[in-house]
Image: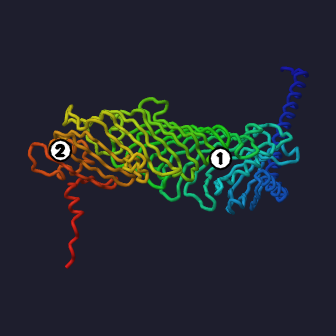
Amino acid sequence: MQQIDPTDAETHKDNDTLRQRRGSRSHLRRFGLICATIAVALSLVLLPPLINISRYQRRIVTSISGSLGRPVHLDRVSISLLPLPGFDIENLVVDEDPAFGYEPIIRANKVHATVRLSSLWRRRVEFSTISFTEPSVNLVSSAAGKWNIEGILLQASHIDTAPTAQAKAGPAPRFPYIEATGARINFKEQQEKKPFSLIESQFALWSPDPNQWRLRLRAKPSRTDSNASDTGTIEMETTLGRGETLAGIPINLEGQWRDAPLGEASRVLTGHDAGWRGNLVLSANIRGTVGESAVTSRLHLIGARRADFVPQQPLSAEVECFATATAIFHSFQDVRCSWPPNGNGPTMALTGEVPNIRRLEDASVQIGTSGIPAATLLNWARVVTPGIADGVEATGNLVGSLTYDGAATHHWTGKLTLHDAGLTTTETGAASLVSGDVLLQTPQTTIPDTRHRRNVSAPTPAQDGFALSITGLQLGGHDAGVLTGQLNPTAYTLRLQGTATEDRLSQLAHAFPATAGDLIEAAGTGHASGPFRVDLTSSHAWGEPQLWHDTAARQAQTSAPAKKAR
C-alpha cells in the first residue's frame, strides 16, 4: 500500500484554494462589467431628461447667432449621447438681412451638432462637427451688386477662432467642421428667384489655419423652367482668408463642371436645348481677392455635333481664356481667349471686356485670326450642317477680324477674307468651282464728302449683318460668275449672276445640296449645251429649305400693279 507524502497533500490544497480565488475574482470582474453596462444604459435613458435643455438651447442660439451676425430660431433641441455626445436640432432658421428681403438665408429641418468634450472644462460649448440634412440656402444679389452673404463672411473674419483640427482647447474656440448633404442653393436678384439653382449639393467648411477657411462643394446644376436632367457635376474647392472688407478677402478657387452633355448644359444656361450633342468640361481657377482677381478658364468640347445628324468627324476642341475679375465678379476686364490654347494649330483669338455681367449686350468683343486653312473651315462646317457632299475639298487661308461694340452700336462690324479660295469635288476633278477671294464684311454705303466733293464708302453699323461677295465662280461661261449676299442673325439673301453651263451648275448643286436646293430648276431647263445667263435669288430665314427664284421674274411679279376687284 502506497503512502502519501504530507507535503504533496498540502501543495494540492494550496492549488485548489488559488483556483477558487481566481474564479471568484473573474466572477467579480464579470459582475462589475455587467453593472457598468447597466449603469451606462440607465444614464443614457435617465440623464437626458434631467439635463436642462432650455439652457443649452439658449446657448446654441446665442452662439450661432453671434457667429453669423443674424438672428437664429429653432423649434426643438434634444441631447444624443451615442455615438458621441451632441445635440439634435429641429427646424433651424437663419434670418435674412432686411436689405435683401425677408426669406430666410438658411433653413434646415434637421441639424446634428457633436460636442467637443474637452471644451466643457473651460465652461463653454464647442462643436467638433455641425451636420445639416437637406438645408435650403438663398444667395441674394442686390441692385447695387452686393450679396447677402457679405455680412456673414465679414462677421466670421472678425472672430478669433482656432483651427478645426486643433486637439486641445485653447483661449480661442475651435472652428467646427460644418457639412451638409442634399442641400439646395438658390440664387435671387433682389426679390426675384432665378430659375438656376444647385441641387443635391454636398459641401464642407472648416478652418485649416486661424486666418483661413476652406470650402469644398459638389453639386448638380439645375433649372426650374426646363426639364434638364443629366446636367453633369460641379466640383469646387475654395480657400478664403481674412479681410477688413469683402473685396479685400483673399481667395483661391479651383472648380470644374464635368460630364455635362451639351444639350442639357444649354438647357441649364439658356433654358432651352440649343440642338447640340456631345460633352463639355469647363474648369476655372481664381486667384487674388474677392474684389479683384486673375481668372483662368478652359473649355473642352468632346464630340460636339448638331442633334439632327451625325457627321463623320464630330468636333473636339479646347478654348483657354484669361481675364481680370473686378467689382466682386460683376465685371471682367482684359479678356483674352485662344482656340486652340498655346497656338497649337490654326488659331482664333478673342479679346474684349464685360463691364457688367448683368448687361452682356454692353460687352465689347473682337474676334480675329491671322490664318485658318479653308480645309479646317470646311471640317467645322460639316459639323454644323449636313449640306456639304462627300468629296468636296477647299483651299485658301482665312484672315481678318470682327468687332462687337456694345457701348455704342450694339452691332458686329469687320471684315474676313478667304484668300486664294478654291473648291473642288469628285465631279470637277482639278477644276475649281471658285477662284480668287471670298469676302465677308460690314455692308458699305456711299455718303457724300462735301469737303472734297466726292462720294466715299463707309460701313453702315445700323444694319446688324454682313455682306458676302464671291467674285470668282467658274460656272462654265466666258466670264466668272458672282455670288453676293446679305446675312443677318435671322435671315439671309443670296444672288447668283453670270454665265453658266448646266453641267457646272449641277456640280455646284451636288457639292452643296442643302444650299443649292432647286438651283437647276430655277435656272431653267432645255438650254443648249453652251453657256447661258443666270440671275437667281434666294431669301430665307436660317434653317428653312433653300429655294431659288429667277430674279427678273420675281421682280416683275412683285412690281406688277394689283388688279382692281370688280
**Viewer-proximal residue among 233 and 12:** 233
Q: Quadrant of the C terminus?
A: bottom left
**Mark 2 nearby-residue class (10 Å; few <14, some 14–19, many ≥20):** many
* Residue 509 in view (yes/no): yes
**Compared to 231, does 345 lie above or below?**
above
Give the side of residue 548 with respect to residue 49, left or right.
Answer: left
Percent of width and height locating residue 475? 19, 41
To which residue does mark 2 refer? 499
**How packed is label 1: few (under 14 Cα within 10 Å), some, or many (20 or more)?**
some
**x and y percentages locating residue 191 in the rendered image:** 63, 62
Q: Quadrant of residue 186?
A: bottom right
Say whether residue 65 is left or right of residue 529: right
How many numbered marks have been drawn onto this rendered protein structure? 2
Nearer to me, 483 or 101? 483
Q: Nearer the viewer, mark 2 or mark 1?
A: 2
Q: Is residue 133 left or right of residue 446?
A: right
Q: Quadrant of residue 530?
A: top left
Mark 2 lies on a secondary structure that is strand
Of the 4 image quadrants, the one containing the N terminus is top right
Residue linked to disc 1? 328
The answer to whether 50 is drawn above or below residue 39 in the figure is below
Residue found farthest to the bottom: 566
Q: Nearer the viewer, residue 123 or 278?
A: 278
Q: CA distance from mark 2 to mark 1?
A: 62 Å
**Residue at left offset 34%, top offset 41%:** 439
Give the residue drawn at x 26%, y 41%: 389
Label 1 sits on a secondary structure element that is loop
Q: Amino acid at mark 1?
A: Ile
User: In screen coordinates, is 120 left or right of 395?
Assistant: right
CB atoms at circles 2 and 1 under 8 Å apart?
no
